[in-house]
Amino acid sequence: MPSMRRRVVILYSIGLAAIMVPILAAILLAAYMSVDRQRDRASAMAADILHRSHNVSDQLAHVFAELSTRQTPEPCAEPNLNLMRKLVIQSNLLLDVGYVADEQLVCSSFGSIGYRLGPKSYVSAAGYNIWTQFEHPLLPGSRLVVTGDAKTGFAALVHERTVLDGAALDKKLTYGVLGVGRRKEIFHNGLFDPLWFDKIGDKYETSFFDGAGVVAWKRSDRYDYAAYVAIPRSEIEHDGWRVLLVLLPIGIGAAGVLAFVVAQLVRINGALPAALRVALKRGEFFLVYQPIVDLRTKEWVGAEALLRWRKSTGEFVSPDVFIPVAERNRLIERITQRVLELVASDAADLLRKRPDFHVAVNLSAQDICNPDICARLRAITTAMGINNQCIHIEATERVFLHAEQARKSVEALRAQGHLVAIDDFGTGYSSLSYLTEFTMDSLKIDKCFVGTIGQHAVTSHVIGHIIEMAKSLELKMIAEGIETEEQAEYLRAHGVQFGQGWLFSKPMPMHELVEQLASRRSPERPVGS
């Protein structure tokens, strides 16, 4: 009952996980995607600001170059004013061009005006005087940037919107153009956080999440400034909700599908024990036999009885599915009894005529530890009229979990004349100490190790260790799953005596096995051919 409760708890836990994991995955994916989307958004905005800044700088360079070739040395002379007007008309970005002296805009394309600029904000690394957030008397509320050539005194005025508004930036964001050398904002909506330099370093382009939001940085490769954009966490979370509205229905749908699958598995798992009982009553189980071959002579010396289940509907159920269910629900001993009855029905005549042949039967840990197992086998061999040596026993490694009882049973089975092999060695609970404590006759090498022969796999060396260990314990060896001549030759060369696999024969009904044996012993097909 406690075991059943544990299984119920496990199944309900799996069901809950099937529902919650896709939904949680959708939430986490939405958060990740929103950060990623906002990084792309910030990077695109910073690239646009930098592009517009380059356009402004290029026009400033052209204006200063033209004014340096003025016709008269008097900066505010009429010829120079005409040149200023011409340059403003030619420019699509500059608001005005003028001359600055003593922190005053003495004249411009508008004529002699005398507007006071006040102290300059800073001097750029290239030697330009910069005034930021200048409010032009003719344009109240304006935020202009004045850039002056310190050598000539000529200057140009640019509105912040020329650089910043083109990116369609949200006023809730922080963005601008920063003079890198002096670490001073030129155009900006929100100030640059000096702590960002720790992540920017010497990079010309980067983006990152600083905990408070996403920051993108793009530095000019021509001028001493960089564009920056910072999107706050609130914007990321708002975008995350939009993404979640798309992903959550998908996650809920996936959760529904997984929950349905888990429910079906629970139903099937719960129905299988009942179906197994019905199968036992209806006789839906049958055996096929796969030959065991002497690798040296290629003679068929025995066969392993393999249980199959075909429902009344014609559907086959794999032993990998129903055997664990039978073991958990204490039905395995009834199934083993059915196997013994089928062997008695199928193989009695063959084993009476061929006492040198044997049939190997798989027993579970529950079977081995059952005190009545020897009596059950003795009753079967007596009814068949054969020697006990004709029935070999293959025990799974799980018998080692019940070492004391299993040891007694194995000793009794061997005393009764049955040869006992440990099955699927290396895949379960076995260890060298267990093998030295138990007296066995042979060891079966699992097909997963045989399959690595010639494959240069990470585990390909394991089979060599298993073979050497079996030799040191003086155990016969049977290799399962042999499919190629290369595998068979390797096993023969390394002293493995017996093998089975599709290289020699597929599993077959008893009547086909008898026919094949007769054919192999005919005068045209001598033994060992």
Image: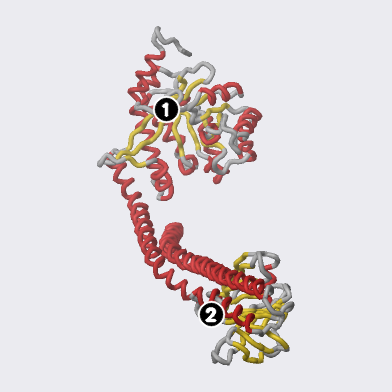
Q: Amino acid at mark 1?
A: Gln
Q: Earlier in the sequence, mark 2 or mark 1?
A: 2
- Residue 45 percent coordinates (x, y): 53, 70
Q: Nearer the viewer, residue 495 or 374?
A: 495
Where on the picture, by quarter, is residue 185? Answer: bottom right
Q: Are marks 2 and 1 in contact (CB under 8 Å)?
A: no
- Estimate the spatial distance between the alpha carbons at disc 2 and disc 1, rounded to whole Å: 85 Å
Query: Helix, strand or loop at disc 2?
Result: helix
Q: Is residue 218 above or below residue 119?
A: above
Identify the residue position indicated by label 2 in the image. 161
* Residue 145 at least partly seen: no
- Which numbered disc, 2 or 1, marks the residue closer to the eye? 2
The label number, if any, that marks residue 219 in the structure image: none
Q: Nearer the viewer, residue 190 or 108?
A: 108
Can residue 300 be seen in this snapshot? yes
Q: Using the image, determine if residue 306 lies above or below residue 43.
A: above
Picture quarter containing residue 438?
top right
- Secondary element type, mark 1: strand
Q: Quadrant of the N terminus?
A: bottom left
Q: Position of residue 520 (x, y in %)?
A: 41, 14
Q: Residue at x 51, y 20 (%)?
A: 294
- The extreme top residue here reads 523
Q: Return the residue at label 1.
A: 290
Residue 498 coordinates in the image, percent (x, y): 52, 24
Q: Is residue 399 above or below residue 109?
A: above
**Residue furthest out toward the left:** 313
